[in-house]
Amino acid sequence: MNRIKEIIKCYNENAIVRRVNVVLVYIFLFNVIFFPNDTFNIKIISLFLLLVLNFWSTPLKNKIDYLVFFFGLIVPTFTIVLSIIITKSFINNIKLGYPAVILLLYLVVKKFNINFEKVFFIMLEILAYIEVIVFILHISGVLCMGTNPMVLWYSKTNNALYGEGKYATFGSLFYIKSACLLFIYEAYCIEKRKYFSLVITCIALFATGTRANVFLMLALLYICCIIVQKNNKIRVCIILSSLVAIIVGLFGAGLYRYILAIFEKKSFDDAVRSGHLNSLIKYWKSDIVRFIIGSGYESEFYSIGVNAMVRDIELSYFNLLRQVGIIPFMAMMGMYALPIVYVAKNKIKSKKIVCITMGYIMYLILGAVDPFLYNSTAVTLVLYMYYICFDTHYIENLENKL
């Protein structure tokens, strides 16, 4: 037994082993952000290699480690196995059910003291620039989205959505499916007073072309500005000026008509969501067992929202509940909620963590209307939140800077 412990210790302290793990984590992160649909299968390969290299050599040392093990292995394994039994489909259920396993990388990041945040934010800033450049090229007429080869490739490979004309909320949209992570970078830029990067990030979220992203971006900007402001008088001024802006907006005919037009463009989407929800309620009423044990990741149901059989819908919380059943769903909600509960319960003094947590909440709110709750992008964000809340190396470095 002592011999095994010695081998594990030597393995974990080996410099080459650490470098390999660092490179694999960064490769994984790169593909999560820039190729969210895993076009080249590098994301799943790098994740698999990281798990193989570390599963046998990473002891669970505290309560958080055990919770990560539970959320990242026990829960997804249970839901995948149950989904396979119910739907008789093997590969697709694994593909749809594996994202929670990504949380296990928290143990790897912590063990090798990997600077996850630095590279994460560098990549998010590059992502913001990509969104902004495509947007500027389009509105300036230099290169329209319909003829932009990068936009067309991203759309063809299902890594992004794009559109232009009257059906796009703001006239055009280019939505790389990981762009919703920019809420986190927006919060970080506000706290660090990186104003140029903040402007780029806000334009990028606007360029995604969805009203939810824009409204949540503005809400986050407002909340974080109040959080980071030390002067109470300035806080009051921010609140009063925002109230004045709202009143002017409501009674300003031009702005009112513009906002109304935005909602009219999206009214069809709202009708579809309403149809999905009504169909789900009817689906559960017809067989309560489906509500308890789920229908499987690969399962479909008939929705009057589109008058067809569907598997993935924009109501992410309800769809996940439909797929996994009430008990696993509650466990998954615990996985998402743990960082928020920790920050609230411990009254964290770091304004950086508080602002980023607000960005995280905005992402979770977005999950109510967009299909981004349970995928590799979402769980990578959860991984980052666990890293800044529970990684002792990160917390020690942060406390030294306070």
Image: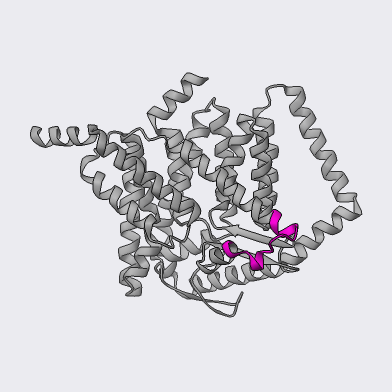
Query: Which residue does the image show at 67% across and 61% down from the upper left?
Result: 173
Residue at the far bottom: name it.
307
Q: Quadrant of residue 83?
A: bottom left
The residues colored magenta run 136-150
Q: Is residue 263 left or right of residue 120?
A: right
Measured along the vertical axis of the image, is residue 136 above or below residue 219? below
Query: Which residue does the image show at 25% across and 37% down from the upper left?
Result: 16
Judge by depth and name the residue closer to the eye, 157 or 357.
157
Q: Is residue 318 left or right of residue 137?
A: left
Q: Position of residue 300 (x, y in %)?
A: 46, 74
Measured along the vertical axis of the image, is residue 304 above or below residue 385? below
Residue 138: in magenta span: yes
Judge by depth and name the residue closer to the eye, 304 or 203.
203
- Is residue 181 visible to us here? yes
Number of marks in picture:
0
Q: Position of residue 389 (x, y in %)?
A: 45, 34
Q: Main secondary structure of the magenta part?
A: helix
